[in-house]
Image (cartoon, rainbow, N blue to C red):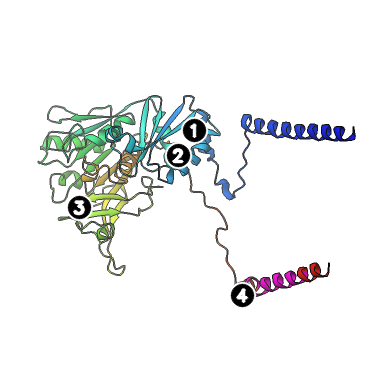
């Protein structure tokens, strides 16, 4: 009888324990609770990203086209889990591009793959993903108001509608996916640049502009409107417009010092792997490639505040190196409510159909356009750096630790082993 009572008691106790464990497992699945105890909350979303997710009611779809062997899959999954804590209808799926080669060609994926973010029927392709890039992509996709970008045409410029290697058709398609519409304009048929144009782009005209056209562009600049000028080495067709901005294009092309480090034997190719402090390049971690680049210099005081956007080293020897500028941003306050913004680049190839897919070229182009359009809604999320990542020890501490692990600890283990052995032997 006692045996049966003991067995029943044991069974009930076991059942109670299993029920408790099962109940706790159910509660953790139904009401998950996670605590981030890391320094600076390294494993949590910033407050800015949390507010952004709260303002997005529709589901967010993300498709990561990455090979199964790529370890970055785990990092992306962990990042998306942080977003799901605040927005459960964030969905992520992984697809191996090798299993869907036609889709990979359609999306023009690089060998490293990409992540396609879709919201409300619009999508954006990210070649590098972290909290900053993902939150800003979502912010961009949530914008429902289209804006128009005018591209000057009629002089052999690189066309946003063209499919030739030197044209900007792929870049225009990427802009369209971000609700930025491209329109070509011919100033021989217009008296003024359209008022609904948020930005004018002049992309390396092959022949000189007519005096009347230059006059229209000068008035556009004087009115305080935004402008992107893409020049090319030894192209003098933009000289008068650059003079209006107080700039001059140096003859010849820049000979970069670091191209061989990246396996490129053509010294006329410039690779940017670090960037000056600027709103456009803030947080940019990708290298960008610029073929055949012309240097820019400030010639006269035009009333603009000039900032270096891109520069190239002329020598690997720091003592001989003279950085050459090939990207400048200009800004000034005018009678308009917003600041006038202008970017001048000594290269237009980096946005062409041929080179747009190189590492961070698309990212750089989109960043330039966003800055020119005053898209200052973008989130600036400072990098989270864990405190006390380095352990600094004095020489005395190093000696004590070495003595302890190499001599003292083995001696203690040996003595304790001998004591246990003697004690067991006596038993």
Report the Cα–Cα distance between label 2 and label 1: 9 Å
- Camera-near label (4 vs 2) is 4
Q: Is residue 140 left or right of residue 77?
A: left
- Using the image as rendered, state which of residue 365 and residue 394 is in the foreground: 394
Instruction: Tell me the element at label 1.
Output: helix
Instruction: Tell me the element at label 4.
Output: helix
Q: Is residue 138 left or right of residue 417?
A: left
Above or below, 183 against 427 in this view is: above
- Using the image as rendered, state which of residue 195 and residue 98 is in the foreground: 98
Mark nearer the N terminus (1 vs 3): 1
Mark nearer the N terminus (1 vs 4): 1
Find disc 2 in the rendering and name its residue. 379
Find disc 4 in the rendering and name its residue. 399
**Residue 294 bears which disc, if any?**
3
Residue shown at the point (33%, 35%) measured from the top left: 99
Residue 223 visible (yes or no) = no
Find disc 1 in the rendering and name its residue. 52
In magenta, the rendered stretch is: 404-419
- Of the 4 image quadrants, the one containing the C terminus is bottom right
- Camera-near label (4 vs 3) is 4
Number of residues whose C-alpha sits closer than 10 Å to that of mark 4, classed few (under 14), some (14–19) or many (20 or more) = few
Mark nearer the N terminus (4 vs 2): 2
Q: State how many labels appear.
A: 4
Mark nearer the N terminus (2 vs 3): 3
Residue 355 visible (yes or no) = yes
Tell me the chief SS of the magenta region: helix
Q: Is residue 60 left or right of residue 372?
A: right
Residue shown at the point (34%, 44%) measured from the top left: 112
Looking at the image, do the residues carrying marks 1 and 3 touch, with CB atoms under 8 Å apart?
no
């Amino acid at each position: 009888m006692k045996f049966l009572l003991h067995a029943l008691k044991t069974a009930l106790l076991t059942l109670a324990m299993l029920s408790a464990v099962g109940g706790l497992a159910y509660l953790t699945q139904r009401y998950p609770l996670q605590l981030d105890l890391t320094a600076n909350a390294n494993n949590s979303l910033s407050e800015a990203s949390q507010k952004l997710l709260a303002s997005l009611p529709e589901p967010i779809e993300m498709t990561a086209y990455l090979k199964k062997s790529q370890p970055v899959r785990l990092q992306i999954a962990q990042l998306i889990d942080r977003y799901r804590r605040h927005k459960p209808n964030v969905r992520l799926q992984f697809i191996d591009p090798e299993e869907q080669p036609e889709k990979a060609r359609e999306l023009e994926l690089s060998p490293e793959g990409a992540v396609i973010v879709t919201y409300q029927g619009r999508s954006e392709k990210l070649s590098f993903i972290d909290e900053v890039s993902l939150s800003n992509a979502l912010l961009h996709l949530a914008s429902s108001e289209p804006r128009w970008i005018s591209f000057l045409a009629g002089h052999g410029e690189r066309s946003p509608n063209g499919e030739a290697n030197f044209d900007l058709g792929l870049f225009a398609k990427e802009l369209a996916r971000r609700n930025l519409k491209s329109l070509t304009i011919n100033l021989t048929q217009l008296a003024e640049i359209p008022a609904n144009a948020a930005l004018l782009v002049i992309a390396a005209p092959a022949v000189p502009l007519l005096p009347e056209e230059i006059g229209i562009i000068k008035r556009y600049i004087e009115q305080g409107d935004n402008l992107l000028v893409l020049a090319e080495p030894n192209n003098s067709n933009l000289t008068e417009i650059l003079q209006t901005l107080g700039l001059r294009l140096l003859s010849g092309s820049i000979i970069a010092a670091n191209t061989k480090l990246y396996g490129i034997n053509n010294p006329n190719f410039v690779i940017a792997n670090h960037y000056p402090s600027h709103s456009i390049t803030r947080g940019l971690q990708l290298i960008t490639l610029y073929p055949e680049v012309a240097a820019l210099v400030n010639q006269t005081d035009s009333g603009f505040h000039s900032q270096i956007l891109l520069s190239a080293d002329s020598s690997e020897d720091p003592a001989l190196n003279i950085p050459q500028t090939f990207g400048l941003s200009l800004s000034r306050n005018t009678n308009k409510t917003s600041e006038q913004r202008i970017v001048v680049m000594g290269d237009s190839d980096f946005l062409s159909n041929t080179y747009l897919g190189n590492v961070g070229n698309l990212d750089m182009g989109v960043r330039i356009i966003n800055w020119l359009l005053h898209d200052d809604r973008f989130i600036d999320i400072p990098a989270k750096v864990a405190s006390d990542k380095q352990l600094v020890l004095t020489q005395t501490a190093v000696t004590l630790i070495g003595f302890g692990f190499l001599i003292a600890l083995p001696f203690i283990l040996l003595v304790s082993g001998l004591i246990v052995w003697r004690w067991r032997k006596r038993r």
